[in-house]
Amino acid sequence: MALRTSSNRCIDPNRVLTNAIGGFHLERARAHRRSPHFRRPGETVFAHSATISIGFQMRAWIKVVEEGEAKEELAKTYDEVRGSRGRVSNVMKIHSLDPEAMKLHLQLYLHLMYGKSSITRTQREMIAVLVSQLNGCQYCVTHHEEALRAHSRNPDLIKSLKDDFSNAPISERDRVMLEYVAKLTRQPSLVAETDVRRMREVGFTDEEILRVNLITSYFNFVNRIVAGLGTPVEEDKERVYMY
């Protein structure tokens, strides 16, 4: 059975469509099995199982304990998240049945995105947006393009990262970094030592290469949490975070 996209185009769920983004091919197959919040760039798949966020009530594919219902360890963990981020995002709430995982996830996020490193906040958010765009994770693209806008103040950069980063208004150093990020995201088995050497050639230290790798790996991990559990994007008024 064909599906109809927002552009009124029919998709055969069993047909693989390829689209080159930044020189890397994306496979678009079995669209009917994807979360409506995890879709390919420019494509909205309408499905009867779609879930949305209504007010402050989160709707996902598994049980979520809301902040007002939280007790003991979960209530304390929610407090920690609010204290560091301003609000509890849905990607944190989706961990509510495992408060310890939520706490550890928060610690990893804060370390990678805010911890001491010569990789700038703008570079970190560029990685977040590119990985999430390549994976079709609208949730993470929405959050981190807002953060990138706050740090770069360059809307052309955001648009080019979402369309084709090879034409982005960035330095050669950043372009090489994003080539590594894209390859590790889309073709991890093809990443070779030469890719790391190329980053060294444009001035990255091994400590910086490690941080780029960890941030890339982190967002591939988070994109799959969002995709696999139907984590919805918050409404605009709910997305008030400390970027």
Image (spheres, helix red, strand yellow):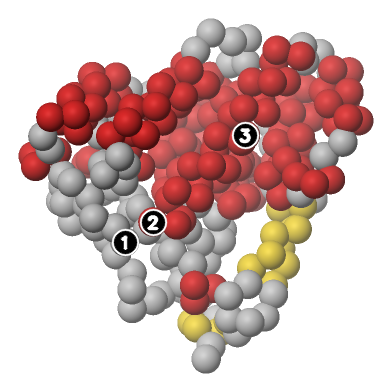
Q: Nearer the viewer, mark 3 or mark 1?
A: 1
* x 45%, y 26%: residue: 109
Q: Residues within 10 Å of mark 3 (few under 14, many from 20)?
A: many
> In this rendering, is residue 201 above or below 141?
above
In primary-sequence order, the first of circles 2 and 1 is 1
Q: Position of residue 144 (x, y in %)?
A: 46, 36
Q: Secondary structure at mark 1?
A: loop
In primary-sequence order, the first of circles 2 and 3 is 3
Q: Secondary structure at mark 3?
A: helix
Question: Residue 61, which numbered label?
Answer: 1
Answer left or right for 239 relative to 36. left
Assess whether mark 1 and mark 2 are in contact (beta carbons under 8 angstroms). Answer: yes
Assess whether mark 3 and mark 2 are in contact (beta carbons under 8 angstroms). Answer: no
> In this rendering, is residue 61 above or below 69?
below
The image quarter in which residue 206 lies: top right
Q: Report how far apart the C-alphas of labels 3 and 1 lie in the structure.
A: 26 Å
The residue nearer to you, when weighing 10 against 216, is 216
Question: Residue 216, which numbered label?
Answer: 3
Tell me the amino acid under the disc marked 2.
Answer: Leu
Look at the image and tell me whether residue 177 can be seen. yes
> In this rendering, is residue 162 above or below 52?
above
Answer left or right for 198 relative to 228. right
* x 73%, y 20%: residue: 209
Question: Residue 229, which numbered label?
Answer: 2
The residue nearer to you, when weighing 164 against 239, is 239
